[in-house]
């Protein structure tokens, strides 16, 4: 059993900042890739940022220079620092983690339940 839990969403004014956190826990041998997706009303879920265990990072173009993803492997945590927020960043943000279980040859993706980020004046 694995749990992935996000925290840190909320309401912020345009130009403001928020920091999202996500922790994976449970039957974990190793956490591989971690990252954040988001889904706005009426839109498809999109990848915002991803980070490998070795800290290779990818961002969607719309957040480059404003968002920073980081991770703490010892705590199985991933963070998303969001600065200069815009109304178009409003969405439910979902954390994912690709996890290898003890005794398993395959790894699996696990998702959090999502945290709402609303950017509005």
Image (cartoon, rainbow, N blue to C red):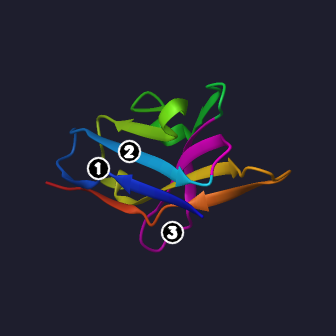
Dot label at residue 8: 1
**In the image, residue 21 lies at what x, y percent?**
38, 44
* Quadrant assignment for the N terminus: bottom right
Secondary element at tag 1? loop
Looking at the image, which residue is at 35% across and 45% down? 20
Rendered residue at 67%/57% (across/down): 109
Q: Secondary structure at mark 3?
A: loop
- Please give the range of residues in magenta: 28-51
- The answer to whether 109 appears left or right of 106 in the picture is left
Q: How far across and down, in percent of the image, does residue 37 sit?
A: 53, 54
Tell me the number on the disc at residue 43: 3
Q: Nearer the viewer, residue 30 or 97?
A: 30
Quadrant location of the C terminus in the rendered image:
bottom left
Q: Is residue 30 magenta?
A: yes
- Compared with 76, 24 (above or below) is below
Secondary structure that dominates the magenta span: strand
Q: Are marks 3 and 1 in contact (CB under 8 Å)?
A: no
Q: Residue at x 65, y 31 (%)?
A: 53
- In the picture, measured across the screen, residue 41 lies left or right of residue 31, that is left
Is residue 54 positioned above or below 15 on the image? above
Mark found first going from the N terminus, 2 or 3? 2
Q: Residues within 10 Å of mark 2 (few under 14, many from 20)?
A: many
Task: Measure the C-alpha gap from mark 3 to mark 1.
Answer: 22 Å
Mark found first going from the N terminus, 3 or 1? 1
Q: Which residue: 72% across, 57% down? A: 108
Secondary structure of the residue carrying tag 2 is strand
Of residue 48 and residue 34, the one placed in the foreground of this image is 34
Name the residue tied to disc 2.
21
Q: Nearer the viewer, mark 3 or mark 1?
A: 1
Pointers 2 and 1 in contact (C-beta within 8 Å):
yes
Q: CA distance from mark 2 to mark 1?
A: 6 Å
Kindly tell me whether residue 45 is visible in this rendering.
yes
């Amino acid at each position: 059993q694995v749990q992935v839990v996000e925290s840190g969403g909320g309401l912020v004014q345009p130009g403001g900042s928020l920091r999202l956190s996500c922790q994976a826990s449970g039957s974990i041998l190793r956490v591989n890739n971690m990252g954040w997706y988001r889904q706005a009303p009426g839109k498809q879920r999109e990848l915002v940022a991803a980070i490998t265990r070795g800290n290779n990072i990818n961002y969607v173009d719309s957040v480059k220079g404003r968002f920073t993803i980081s991770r703490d492997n010892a705590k199985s945590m991933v963070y998303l620092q969001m600065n200069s927020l815009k109304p178009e960043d409003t969405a439910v943000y979902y954390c994912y983690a690709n996890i290898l279980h003890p005794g398993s040859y395959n790894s699996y993706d696990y998702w959090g339940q999502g945290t709402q980020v609303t950017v509005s004046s």
